[in-house]
Image (cartoon, rainbow, N blue to C red):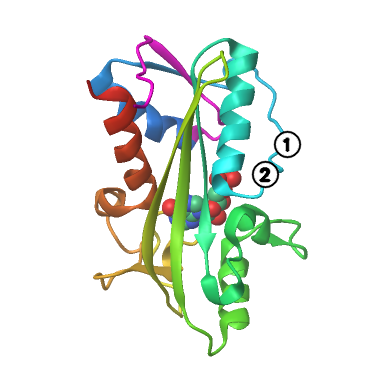
Amino acid sequence: MARKFTEKKLVVASHNEGKVREIRDLLVPYGVEVLSSKELDLTEPVEDGDSFVANAEIKSNSAASESGMVSLADDSGLVVPALDGAPGIHSARYAYNPWKEERDFGYAMGKLNLELGEKSREAHFVCALSLAWPDGHVETFEGKVFGALTWPIRGENGFGYDPMFIADGHQETFGEMKPNAKHAISHRADAFKKLIDACFNT
Ligand code: IMP
């Protein structure tokens, strides 16, 4: 049995405003006040784990021990089996454009398309969500959405690799889908559902 979350407040171990907002919205029905590690000025740990789960746990454990409050962290990315799982846990870093000296997902998707050539375009997004207590207890859940990478990229919605990804059973890319449609089937939604069922629903 997973440990239940029974507090009034939670720290989201992320300095990314978008992520914090998404998690805050999701926890509204549970009456949880969501603070962010940025608001509390917590340190950002080095994410040197070798999996999404390991990196999510590094972040949630670090925020929980520093704040003394239950903390939630997520780690996510795109996995392409034909490229030995790349960009995987390095999804954000893979998008670094050395000429522009900044993160550039147009560049990252072009690079993926070239590396793939005639190889299989099957891909999936993964999201690991980890809830950590200050006493060291952790509950971690992994969500996935399977699909394929298309070229040329399509759509202005979403972020990251969304314009290149078509989920199985769909025609639109994540970049073309309305946000609510993506949120209903995404890797993050899958992980959240598992977390809510295990730790929030009584
Ligand atoms: P993180 O914020 O360190 O977990 O990095 C996750 C990276 O994976 C992002 O920068 C995106 O490149 C990619 N990623 C994760 N989730 C999604 C998604 O839903 N759509 C598109 N790209 C995603």
State the residue position of label 2.
49
The C terminus - image quarter: top left
Does the magenta stretch mainly form a helix, a strand or a loop?
loop
The N terminus - image quarter: top left
Closest to the camera, between mark 1 and mark 2, is 2
- Whether label 2 lies within 8 Å of ligand 1 gets the answer no
* Residue drawn at 58 percent across, 22 percent down: 37
Please tell me in which quadrant of the rendered image residue 195 appears.
Answer: top left
State the residue position of label 1.
46
Work out whether 177 lies above or below 164.
Answer: above
* Residue drawn at 49 percent across, 17 percent down: 70
Image spot of residue 174 (x, y percent):
36, 61
* The residue stretch that appears in magenta: 1-17
- Judge from the rendering whether residue 1 lies leftward or rightward of residue 110; answer left or right: left
Identify the disc placed on residue 162.
none
Q: Amino acid at mark 1?
A: Val
- Judge from the rendering whether residue 112 lies leftward or rightward of residue 93; answer left or right: left
State the SS at label 2. Answer: loop
Work out whether 126 lies above or below 194.
Answer: below
In front: 1, or 79? 1
As measured in the structure, the alpha-carbon distance from the residue carrying label 1 to the one carrying label 2 is 9 Å
* Residue drawn at 43 percent across, 77 percent down: 150
Image spot of residue 187 (x, y percent):
38, 51
Q: Can residue 14 be found in the magenta stretch?
A: yes
Q: Amino acid at mark 2?
A: Gly
